[in-house]
Image (tube, rainbow, N blue to C red):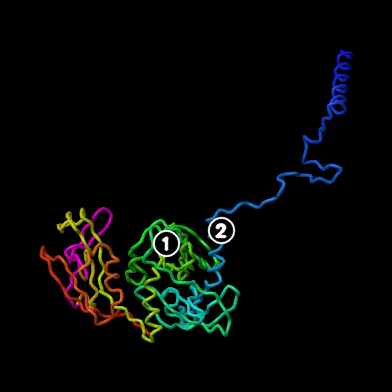
Amino acid sequence: MKFRIIAFAALLVGGFVYATSVAKWQPGRLFSNVSTPTGSPLWSGPGVTQGAGLSSDELNNIDIYKMAHPATVFITSTTLKQDWFLQVYPSKSTGSGFLINDRGQILTNFHVVSGSQELTVTTTDKKNYRATLLDRDPDNDLALIQVDLKGAKVPFLKLGDSEKVQIGQKVLAIGNPFGLEGTLTTGIVSSIGRSIGDENGRTLEGMIQTDASINPGNSGGPLLDSQGNVIGINTAIYGQGGSVGIGFAMPVSRAREMLDSFSSGRKYAPPVLGVTVLPIGPEVAQELGYPAQGGLLVQTVRRGSSASNAGIRGGNRDVVIGRYQVAIGGDLLVTINGKRAEDANSISRALRGKRAGDSIEVELLRGGRTVKVRVTLQASTEERL
């Protein structure tokens, strides 16, 4: 037994001597991560150390954030309230906004600044400015505020073309959700032309729906396209708790009308029709007894509004279609100014560029008859500056 062990050991030693002296085998090459007398590194790895590669889409996100973040501001609105003991105390709420020129003018949501006794704007360099309200458009939840930059140079954002927005295109949202300054989220345009109700009972029409995460505090911040142009103002989320992948932004084209009016020295007073409508397609239209082409079924008409004065009628009884309660018995809007009324955006398109006192022609169906109505437009009854 001992002889076998001795013989095996001799064989191993002989083989090692042969391999290292005759065959010039270098066992150190098997462990290239071990330091050698010449000072080679403990870990060889690649010849050139490289960071994680970034895709072109990631680089685009980074570039847009670096450009847009400094132009996005944090807005604190202070209102005075009374407690149970009639003691007055300040209540603060926060939101976002963004600079649109080098004169310190900032675009945001109306609900961010509504009722405020004091507005404070904080820029990304942590400087605070008192802000004043220049103009507002409550029906589109928009406001224009101003800060005195005291000669400071600040970046500002370019307004894009929200009329060309397409479902599926990439968008980026920047804001201050839950007070977390400078937060970037990305996503796509999930839908366009959405109508949602706000907390004051108004209907915000033609909204851009996105899955880019939007939360409380994002309101008033910019929704940007992949070129860094503002295409929307982040306005609302689905539900009260936080983002569930359904957020809404007001198209920036709505803001242009207010901005144009202000720059020309006029207070903005957009005309409104004063109705809430439900777009119905061929199947639902026929089920309700309307022609197959469908249209906009009038649900309610605001008292004293343009539509009310023109005799347009809302629904008078409710039915349930699927999971939704629908008011029927009212007028079905078929065309507005000769163009087919096929979605809620049809009304806002027809009113674009119009002013109080202008008129539009509405073709509607009532009791099986086609009726043409001339509507003289009035400004919103919402109190304005």
Taking the spot 41% from the left edge, 56% from the top edge, the residue there is 168
Question: Compared with residue 151, is residue 238 higher up or lower down, i.e. above or below?
Answer: above
Q: Would you identify the image quadrant in which residue 18 lies?
A: top right
- The amino acid beneath tag 1 is Gly
Query: Helix, strand, or loop for circle 2?
Result: helix
179 sits left or right of 378 in the view: right
Taking the spot 17% from the left edge, 55% from the top edge, the residue there is 286
Question: Compared with residue 294, is residue 349 higher up or lower down, i.e. above or below?
Answer: below
User: Upstream in the sequence, badge 1 or badge 2?
Assistant: 2
- The amino acid beneath tag 2 is Leu
Magenta highlight range: 309-336
- The residue tagged 2 is 59
The residue carrying pointer 1 sits among few (fewer than 14), some (14 to 19) or many (20 or more) residues within 10 Å by Cα, namely many
Query: Helix, strand, or loop for circle 1?
Result: strand
How far apart are the two marked residues, 1 and 2, measured between alpha carbons? Answer: 24 Å
Taking the spot 27% from the left edge, 67% from the top edge, the residue there is 346
Q: Would you identify the image quadrant in which residue 251 lies?
A: bottom left
**Position in image of residue 338 (x %, y %):** 20, 68
Q: How many marks?
A: 2
The quadrant of the image that shows the N terminus is top right
Question: Compared with residue 75, is residue 316 higher up or lower down, i.e. above or below?
Answer: above
94 sits left or right of 137 in the view: right
Question: Compared with residue 292, is residue 107 higher up or lower down, i.e. above or below?
Answer: below
Front residue of 78/282: it is 282
155 sits left or right of 335 in the view: right
Residue 247's label in the rendered image is 1
Mark 1 or 2: the one toward you: 2
Front residue of 34/146: it is 34
**Position in image of residue 181 (x %, y %):** 55, 68
Residue 32's label in the rendered image is none
